[in-house]
Image (cartoon, rainbow, N blue to C red):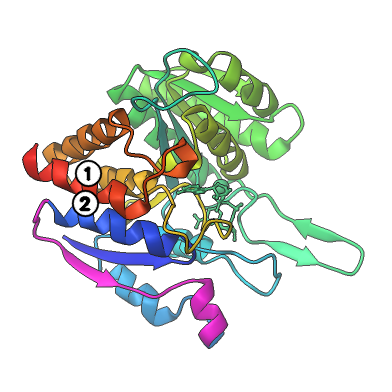
Amino acid sequence: MKIAIVPGDGIGQEVMPAALSVLDAFGLDIEKVPLEIGFCKWEKTGSAITDDDLRLIKECDCVLFGAITTPPDPNYKSVLLRIRKELDLYANIRPFKPLRNVRLPCSGEFDFVIVRENTEGMYSGVEELHKDVAYTTRIITRKGSERIAEQACRIARQRKKRLTIVHKANVLKSDSFFRDVCIGVAKKKGIEYHEMLVDAMAYDLIMHTGKYDVIVTTNLFGDILSDEAAALVGGLGLCPSANIGDKYALFEPIHGSAPDIAGKGIANPLAAILSVRMMLEWAGYNTEAKTIEKAVNSVLEDGIVTPDLRGSYSTNEVSSAITKLIRII
Ligand code: NAI
Ligand code: MG
């Protein structure tokens, strides 16, 4: 397997070496292609990602991604959005279940996955900025909605077979379209479905977390709901994600470059390490993926955690503890 390695900016530079030390502990036959992409590169060269970077990425089977700073500058185009579009990574898959020994804001058992459409909706990139008005066009296509609904049904079939379609169809025509297409796919695939308006969903996800299995939604709603869900599992530093297309895949922590803690060596590496777990599972290394999950839960149980989880360990101390466990499990 050939992997493009993109640490990116801020704590991406810290959690990526931690994640790679865990990956290396398995001694798998993996070729790594390190790439400098992101805001740092933009500051140095005026370009955050080049056509050559994209060509090199496309020569790999998948990408392991840290985090990239996106400044609020209208001239700066989001690198991640470009990669997602170029590689057609249409499904953003984010699993949420409690890890051991992590204090949760709400009680109760839960285990759900958010399947977010990743290439269109509010992030289609069709925008206009004028002096007194700005427009963002929200594009929802039949193809885009069908394939995300199919992906969600596929995941639901491997789980509890319960699909929740989240939208704002009472107000937005584009969401009424998304809803209808999703319902059509769920019926065709024989998957039991429910629907929720996104605002009600934001509330119910906290009140009745255990009710949900697979949640499918559009790009912006999925972005927001998954950060809310990250709070339910105890923090952004614990949440991995997979961006899947038909040909390529990209694995990354949900969190950003966290400039407030960057450079201090205290970023929680677990989201990045669990992203490696998702990558290995995707590539068929199921035993190794399970070993990572076991080792992560074990260090959490032993209280070897970073300050975001009220611990005093550094990024490297956490990853070293996991690496040591992997060698003996
Ligand atoms: P953020 O996720 O970087 O940080 C939010 C808060 O969570 C901060 O207080 C941070 O210290 C904390 N945090 C995040 N990850 C953590 C970790 N692993 N360990 C401990 N604490 C952690 O989001 P923010 O501050 O909104 O964005 C910062 C920059 O990152 C922006 O430029 C934004 O555009 C970018 N960003 C990039 C993403 C990506 O590359 N996928 C995703 C989200 C934001
Ligand atoms: Mg986000």
- Is 38 contained in the magenta span? yes
Q: Residue 49, how many percent across, how many down? A: 47, 76
Between 312 and 284, the one nearer to me in the picture: 312
Q: Residue 191, how many percent across, how many down? A: 39, 19
Report the span colored magenta. 26-44
Q: Locate the C terminus and report the quarter of the image it occupies.
A: top left
Q: Secondary structure at mark 1?
A: helix
User: How many numbered discs?
Assistant: 2
User: Which numbered marker is on residue 22?
Assistant: 2
Q: Amino acid at mark 1?
A: Ile
Q: Secondary structure at mark 2?
A: helix
Q: Is 307 on the left-hand or right-hand side of 55?
A: right
10 in relation to 210, above or below: below
Q: Which residue is mark 1?
A: 322
Q: Amino acid at mark 2?
A: Val
220 in relation to 301, above or below: below
- Is 4 contained in the magenta span? no
User: Which numbered marker is on residue 65?
Assistant: none
- Farthest residue to the front: give it: 312
Task: Give the mark, 2 or 1, whose residue is nearer the N terminus.
Answer: 2
